[in-house]
């Protein structure tokens, strides 16, 4: 089995409605097609990733290349764990947990996208809770970070609902305009104070060395 050589293929996060795990090739193709259909409304730009630049094939290929790249570039000092989000066996999006020098710093960052047809149902919040459960309860993270455009109100609401607090700002180029993002931080102390659904993490023991632990 592939998991015997790459243990992350045996890692699964189970929330009340969702399963988070590495996608296999046919599932990755389905995710790419999902992204091709759109991850936000035309005219919006809620992410730094220019999802509306180019055509559907460009979006699909970006998903493929990004996933293959994070697998190929993995090492214990700098890793990106991109997990497919499944609902009733069907892929609805992807979530990513990233870290550098995690064994020392113990901080992670999160990002995500959902197919536009699957938004507004709470899947994004539930999937991030799954990622944060892995980070805090199983990998002993001290903090989780995220950056959100100030005009991305939906993502702002999700982060603050989960207990993230202001941690400064950053400025990035979005096309030909400079946009301000709020840097948000969720500490382990705040995480323990949150009410959240039960989450199960399977297959982690064999993966711990891959996280630099």
Image (tube, rainbow, N blue to C red):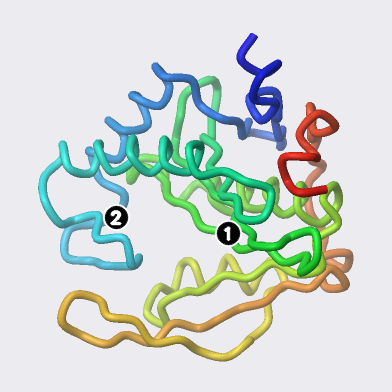
- Residue 193: image location, x then y, percent: 87, 68
The residue nearer to you, when weighing 56 against 124, is 56
State the residue at coordinates (49%, 67%).
155
Q: Which mark is residue 146?
A: none
Secondary structure beneath dot 2 equals loop
State the residue at coordinates (31%, 34%).
34
Q: Nearer the viewer, mark 1 or mark 2?
A: 1
Quadrant location of the N terminus? top right
State the residue at coordinates (85%, 32%).
205
- Residue 6: image location, x then y, percent: 64, 25
- Name the residue tied to disc 2: 40
- Residue 116: image location, x then y, percent: 33, 46
Q: Which mark is residue 110?
A: 1
Q: On the rendered structure, is 125 left or right of 169?
A: right
- Residue 131: image location, x then y, percent: 67, 49
Q: Is residue 212 above or below residue 47?
A: above
Task: Sort mark 2 into few (<14), some (14-19) or many (20+) by Cα contacts within 10 Å.
Answer: some
Secondary structure beneath dot 1 equals strand
Q: Quadrant of residue 101?
A: bottom right
Q: Quadrant of residue 178?
A: bottom left
Residues under labels 1 and 2: Cα distance? 18 Å
State the residue at coordinates (70%, 29%).
11
């Amino acid at each position: 089995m592939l998991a015997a050589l790459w243990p992350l293929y045996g890692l699964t996060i189970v929330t009340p409605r969702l399963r988070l795990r590495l996608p296999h090739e046919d599932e990755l193709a389905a995710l790419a097609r999902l992204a091709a259909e759109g991850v936000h409304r035309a005219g919006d730009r809620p992410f730094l990733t220019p999802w509306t630049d180019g055509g559907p094939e460009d979006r699909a290929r970006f998903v493929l290349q990004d996933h293959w790249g994070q697998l190929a570039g993995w090492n214990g000092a700098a890793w990106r764990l991109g997990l497919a989000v499944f609902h009733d066996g069907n892929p609805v999006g992807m979530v990513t947990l990233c870290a550098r020098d995690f064994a020392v710093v113990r901080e992670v960052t999160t990002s995500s996208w959902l197919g536009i047809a699957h938004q507004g149902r709470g899947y994004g919040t539930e999937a991030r809770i799954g990622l944060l459960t892995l980070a805090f309860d199983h990998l002993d993270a001290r903090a989780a970070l995220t950056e959100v455009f100030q005009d991305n109100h939906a993502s702002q609401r999700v982060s603050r609902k989960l207990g993230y607090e202001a941690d400064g700002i950053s400025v990035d180029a979005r096309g030909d305009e400079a946009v301000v993002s709020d840097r948000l931080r969720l500490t382990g102390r705040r995480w323990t104070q949150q009410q959240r659904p039960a989450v199960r993490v399977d297959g982690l023991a064999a993966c711990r060395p891959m996280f630099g632990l």
